[in-house]
Image: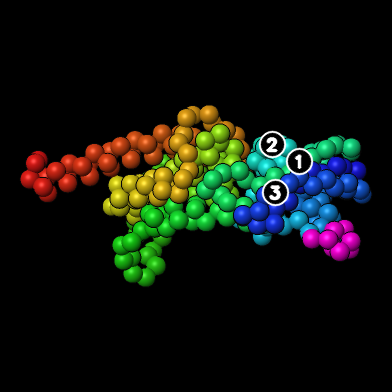
């Protein structure tokens, strides 16, 4: 396959970027998209030019590092697929492909296709843990977990934190990501004691990072490589409302106005 690439190049966060054209020949349909990018970089290195910076790690659709917008779609045109698992047989010989980084104020460009996604880490750090002292590893059956709760928690835990939901959302909202992390812990018995504090802390941190609000476009669910359902957003909104009202009531009681 012979392809024409238009790739975003940017030397640093404070430097204006530009699109750069590359003609790529000899692309195997069995290559992954990242392997095709490796081919581009090998040629650039041979020519003494700066290779295209892009992030990757496992290349197995697990780590969430391969954050690219391909032809206007986060992770490319194939549903439920990360860029590293997107194969070139998805495209046709002679196609023109545009490759860009995630576009969000909370994800500043580091270089070329690499963006700083540490805002997601800070959202998790705000409440994505269980702080009670659990001692040594308990027996697997010591804490009964209803099957429905376990199944829903596992569905939410499938989120790999790639940020595609943010990149796809016209508001650059991180609601799907945050809701998945909240549901992951709040649905389990171990996470229930801190559920109210957790949802308030994570939502407040999400807002502080500069992510936009959810206006129900559902683009997040379409772009998610793990197909996290948007119902988790509604669940988180209900939990946040309940937790906020409880916190206000407790504050009023403490102040003597209850």
Q: Which residue is mark 2?
A: 72
- Looking at the image, is 23 positioned above or below residue 59? above
Q: Which residues are magenta?
A: 43-50
Image disc number at residue 107: none
* Neighbour tally class for label 2: few under 14, some 14-19, many 20 plus, Cα within 10 Å: some
Image x and y of residue 230, in percent: 49, 34
Give the spatial CA distance, label 2 vs label 3. 17 Å
* Neighbour tally class for label 1: few under 14, some 14-19, many 20 plus, Cα within 10 Å: many
Q: In the rendered view, does 50 fall on the left or right side of 206?
A: right
Return the disc, 3 or 1, that comes first in the chain's sequence: 3
The answer to whether residue 144 is seen in the rendering is no
Image x and y of residue 39, in percent: 84, 55
Q: SS for tag 2?
A: loop
Front-lying residue, 134 or 175: 175
Q: Quadrant of residue 244?
A: top left
Q: Nearer the viewer, mark 2 or mark 3?
A: 3
Q: In the rendered view, does 21 fall on the left or right side of 16?
A: right
Q: Image point 62% across, 54% down: which residue? A: 14
Q: In the rendered view, does 244 fall on the left or right side of 140?
A: left
**For the residues bearing labels 1 and 2, Cβ distance under 8 angstroms:** yes
Q: Is residue 195 magenta?
A: no
In the picture, the quarter occupied by the C terminus is: top left
The answer to whether residue 172 is seen in the rendering is yes
Q: Which residue is mark 1?
A: 98
Image disc number at residue 17: 3
Image x and y of residue 179, in percent: 44, 42
Give the spatial CA distance, label 1 vs label 2. 7 Å
Q: Image point 45% across, 49% down: which residue? A: 209
Q: SS for tag 3?
A: loop
Give the spatial CA distance, label 3 vs label 1. 14 Å
């Amino acid at each position: 396959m012979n392809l024409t690439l238009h790739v975003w190049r940017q030397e640093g966060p404070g430097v204006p970027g530009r699109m750069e054209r590359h003609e790529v020949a000899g692309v195997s349909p069995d290559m992954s998209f990242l392997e095709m990018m490796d081919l581009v970089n090998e040629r650039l290195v041979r020519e003494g030019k700066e290779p295209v910076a892009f992030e990757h790690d496992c290349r197995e659709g697990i780590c969430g590092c391969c954050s690219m917008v391909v032809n206007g779609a986060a992770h490319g045109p194939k549903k439920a697929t990360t860029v590293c698992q997107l194969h070139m047989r998805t495209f046709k010989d002679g196609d023109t492909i545009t490759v860009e980084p995630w576009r969000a104020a909370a994800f500043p460009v580091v270089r070329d296709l690499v963006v700083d996604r540490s805002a997601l880490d800070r959202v998790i750090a705000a409440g994505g843990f269980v702080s009670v002292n659990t001692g040594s590893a308990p027996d697997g059956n010591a804490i009964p977990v209803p099957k429905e709760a376990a199944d829903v928690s596992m569905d939410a835990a499938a989120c790999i934190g790639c940020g595609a939901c943010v990149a796809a959302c016209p508001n650059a909202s991180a609601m799907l990501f945050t809701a998945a992390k909240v549901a992951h812990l709040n649905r389990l018995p171990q996470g229930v004691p801190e559920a109210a504090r957790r949802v308030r802390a994570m939502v407040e941190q999400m807002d502080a990072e500069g992510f936009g609000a959810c206006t129900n476009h559902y683009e997040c669910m379409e772009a998610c490589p793990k197909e996290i359902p948007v119902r988790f957003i509604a669940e988180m909104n209900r939990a946040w409302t309940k937790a906020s009202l409880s916190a206000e009531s407790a504050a009023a009681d403490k102040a003597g106005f209850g």
